[in-house]
Amino acid sequence: MEIRAAVVGIGNIGTAHARAIEHGEVPGMRLYAVCDNNPERLLHAAELFPEAKRFDHLGALLADEAVDAVIVATPHPSHAELACQVLEAGRHVLVEKPVDVRLSQAEMLCRKAEKSGRVFAIMLNQRTDPIFRRAREIVRSGALGGLKRSIWIITNWYRTQHYYDSGSWRATWPGEGGGVLLNQAPHNLDLWQWIVGMPTHVRGFCEVAKYHRIEVEDEATLMTRYAGGATGLFITTTGEYPGTNRLEIAGERGKIVIENGTLTHWQLEMSEREFCFASGESFAHIPCQVETFMPEESGDGHVGILANFSDAIRNGAPLISPGQDGLNELTLSNAAYLSAWEQNREIELPMDNERFNALLDERIRQSGGLKEAVSSAPSGHYSERWQVKW
């Protein structure tokens, strides 16, 4: 079975997806069509993908019964709406991250996907990285015991003003729906909850235009609390250089630290909670073993998720990043925004989606609107900036 795939939105990442499929990097999948409402991009696509059909709107694309699956790579606020149209037309769909800007829209999409019987995936490509998969295995196996704390400092998403000026939709409330939490950090927010689980409470501090001439946040800090008593801290920005990528997770039976491409695991011989009250010493050391893990490869990235999407359609393979999983990281960013917009109050999950939507709509109304972009043709290659960086 060969899947005839279409890519909707052929900007930077969409063109890279199309190129990977066109070059045979995704088993069982062929690039059948591309779609974009920008005539210049369609002309560029004609040069890059001469065998692919070209459409200027999704309705025309879906009217072609030969299309089996669609990859949505448009600006964030349109993700859920377009994906719903794809599912309603009976096609499989993979959505770029985030699944949408609004949790309410994302939840509506997930309900539709569940009823459709079609394969619904999201491009959370960093889940293929062996180092994060190992961290998840350790935590979920109980090797750390009850969790105490997790801290992720992910400040190496550096971006220049030129980057923000390169797209009319970038860093605007109507065009992108947010800043670093919606564009760069969804990968890390997803991995964070994928490894340690979802919190019960979120407090957010989002700094708007701290380092750039934009109208959304380019720095954010999340403080979280969990049902078992653990706490969490998440710090990210596009305005620091050099940045840091360090994840530390502490539990009753040890801790893990991921930094510089290495995972270090300290395994205590007994629970710290037990040792604390059993020891007859004031300044005691708990015996422990230390193991390090440094994978030689960084995972299959975007192509790995595309290949898994193809395998799920053709063979029923389990998805690495099911579309429904996109709800969790979007919940974290939506809750952080709502907290920041309401004097940094703590938000209990599940959150008030209607309140969030009203405050987002207010910011969209007050927005300066889409801006003139620096024109450049998409390269068609997966950029280094989309990979895990240490």
Image (cartoon, rainbow, N blue to C red):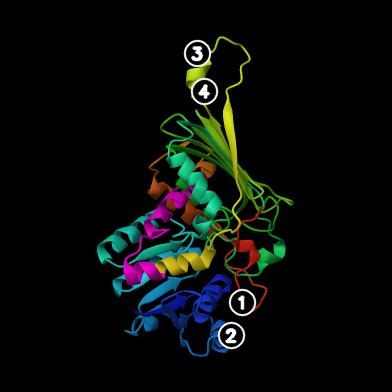
The residue to which callout 3 is attached is 278
Contact between labelled residues 2 and 1, with CB atoms less than 8 Å apart: yes
- Taking depth in this image into account, of 118 and 316 the one nearest to the observer is 316
SS at mark 1 in the image: loop
Distance from Cα at disc 4 to Cα at disc 1: 53 Å
Outermost residue on the right side: it is 242
Height in image: 139 above or below 384? Answer: above
Question: Residue 342, position in %: x, y?
Answer: 51, 41
Q: Earlier in the sequence, mark 3 or mark 4?
A: 4
Contact between labelled residues 4 and 3, with CB atoms less than 8 Å apart: no
Distance from Cα at disc 2 to Cα at disc 4: 60 Å
Structural crowding at the residue carrying mark 3, measured as other residues with C-alpha within 10 Å and reported as few (<14), some (14–19) or many (≥20): few
| The quadrant where residue 168 appears | bottom right
Question: Residue 16, position in %: x, y?
Answer: 56, 74
The residue to which callout 2 is attached is 44
The residue to which callout 1 is attached is 378
Structural crowding at the residue carrying mark 2, measured as other residues with C-alpha within 10 Å and reported as few (<14), some (14–19) or many (≥20): some
Q: Earlier in the sequence, mark 1 or mark 2?
A: 2
Height in image: 361 above or below 229? Answer: below
The residue to which callout 4 is attached is 272
- The residue stretch that appears in magenta: 310-336
Height in image: 9 above or below 155? Answer: below
Mark 2 or 3, closer to the camera: 3
Distance from Cα at disc 2 to Cα at disc 3: 70 Å
Q: Earlier in the sequence, mark 2 or mark 3?
A: 2
Q: Earlier in the sequence, mark 1 or mark 3?
A: 3
Distance from Cα at disc 1 to Cα at disc 2: 8 Å
